[in-house]
Image (spheres, helix red, strand yellow):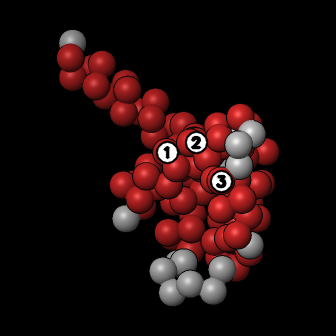
Amino acid sequence: MKSILTAALCAGTFYVVAPQPAEAGVIERACRQADRTAASPSVCGCIQKVANVSLTRSERKKVAAWFDDPHQAQVVRQSSRSGDERLWLRYKAFGERAERTCG
């Protein structure tokens, strides 16, 4: 029974994280356009998959803009607005998850 439950959970997790084959998300596009040596297509795709399950659509759009203007991330991090604080905490958790998942 335990192995069946584990298999079901693993299958469900894979389904949630599985990419949409023909569409690149905003995070993946921003990552690929960033002039960074580690920004390979596979790494950028992995980061997008993690973003899809970690951030809302509007959060993904905001975070993607930070690839071009990292200062905006600092503006959000230092903001006293509760919405910015929530975004920063979710972004931080996303970054940790992406690092563990994507290497």
Q: Secondary structure at mark 3?
A: helix
N-terminal of the pair, mark 3 or mark 2, is 3
Q: What residue sits right under mark 2 in the picture?
A: 90
**Is 51 in front, or is 45?**
51
Disc number lying in front (3 or 1): 3
Query: Residue at label 1?
Result: 93
Which residue lies at the image location 50% right of the left edge and 55% below the top edge? 95
The picture quadrant where one finds residue 65 is: bottom right
In front of the other: 80 or 66: 80
Q: Is residue 100 shown above or below 28?
A: above
For the N terminus, the quadrant is top left
Contact flag, marks 1 and 2 (Cβ < 8 Å): yes
- Residue furthest top as drawn: 1
Amino acid type for the residue under numbered disc 3: Gln
Q: Residue at x 63, y 71 (%)?
A: 31
Q: SS of the residue at dot 2?
A: helix
Above/below status of 34 relative to 18: below
